[in-house]
Image (cartoon, rainbow, N blue to C red):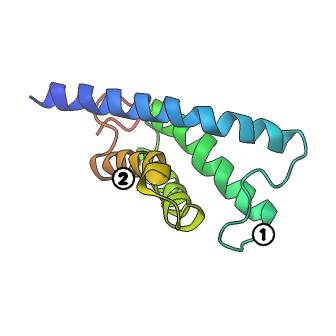
C-alpha cells in the first residue's frame, strides 16, 4: 500500500509541477531578458520583488518539486502565488475564471501536506 501512495505522490508531483512550469518558463525567460515586471504587482510589493516571487513560485519551486528536493517548503510558494491569483487578481471574477488557480493551489497544498514520497531526493 505504501508503494501505491509513493507512486501516486510521484505522479501528482511531476504532473502538476510540469504543467505549472509551463507558466513559469516564459516569465523566467522574460525576466532574464530584462523585463523586471513579469508578474505584475497585485499586492503592492513593487514590480521587481513581485517578479522575483513569481519566478520562485512558478519556475524554481516546480523544478524542486519535480525532483523531490525540499518539496514541502517548495510547494508553499505556488500555494501562495495561486491564492493571490484566485483571491486578489481574480477576486471579482467568476469561479470559472478562478478555477485553474484554485486547482493548482489545491494540488500544491496536497503536496505540501503529504511531502514528496519515496521516489524523490527527500525520500520521505
Q: Residue at x 79, y 36 (%)?
A: 29
Q: For label 1, count other residues whose C-alpha is less than 10 Å away and answer few (under 14), some (14-19) or many (20+).
A: few
Q: Is residue 2 above or below residue 76?
A: above
Q: Which residue is mark 2?
A: 109
The residue lying toward the viewer, choosing from 115 and 98, is 98
Q: Secondary structure at mark 2?
A: helix
Of all residues, the one furthest to the bottom in this rendering is 44
Q: Residue at x 64, y 39 (%)?
A: 24
Q: Residue at x 25, y 29 (%)?
A: 8
Q: Residue at x 72, y 54 (%)?
A: 39
Q: Is residue 82 above or below residue 45?
A: above
Disc ID at residue 31? none
Of all residues, the one furthest to the left in this rendering is 1
- Badges 2 and 1: C-beta atoms under 8 Å apart? no
Q: Earlier in the sequence, mark 2 or mark 1?
A: 1
Q: Is residue 87 above or below residue 123?
A: below
Q: Which residue is mark 1?
A: 46
Q: Which quarter of the figure is the C terminus placed in? A: top left
| Residue 115: x %, y % from top left | 32, 45
| Residue 65: x %, y % from top left | 47, 38
| Residue 26: x %, y % from top left | 72, 35
Instruction: Report whether 45 appears left or right of 60.
Output: right
Q: For label 2, count other residues whose C-alpha is less than 10 Å away and answer few (under 14), some (14-19) or many (20+).
A: some
Q: Which quarter of the figure is the N terminus placed in? A: top left
The residue lying toward the viewer, choosing from 87 and 12, is 87
- Which quarter of the figure has residue 107? top left
Q: Secondary structure at mark 1?
A: loop
Question: CA separation, marks 2 and 1?
Answer: 26 Å
Of all residues, the one furthest to the right in this rendering is 34
| Residue 27: x %, y % from top left | 73, 41
Amino acid at each position: 500500500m505504501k508503494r501505491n501512495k509513493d507512486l501516486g505522490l510521484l505522479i501528482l508531483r511531476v504532473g502538476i509541477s510540469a504543467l505549472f512550469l509551463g507558466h513559469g518558463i516564459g516569465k523566467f525567460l522574460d525576466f532574464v531578458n530584462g523585463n523586471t515586471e513579469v508578474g505584475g504587482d497585485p499586492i503592492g510589493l513593487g514590480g521587481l520583488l513581485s517578479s522575483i516571487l513569481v519566478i520562485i513560485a512558478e519556475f524554481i519551486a516546480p523544478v524542486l518539486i519535480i525532483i523531490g528536493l525540499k518539496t514541502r517548503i517548495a510547494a508553499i510558494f505556488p500555494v501562495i502565488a495561486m491564492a493571490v491569483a484566485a483571491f486578489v487578481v481574480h477576486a471579482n471574477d467568476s469561479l470559472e475564471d478562478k478555477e485553474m488557480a484554485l486547482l493548482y493551489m489545491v494540488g500544491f497544498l496536497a503536496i505540501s501536506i503529504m511531502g514528496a514520497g519515496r521516489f524523490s531526493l527527500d525520500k520521505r
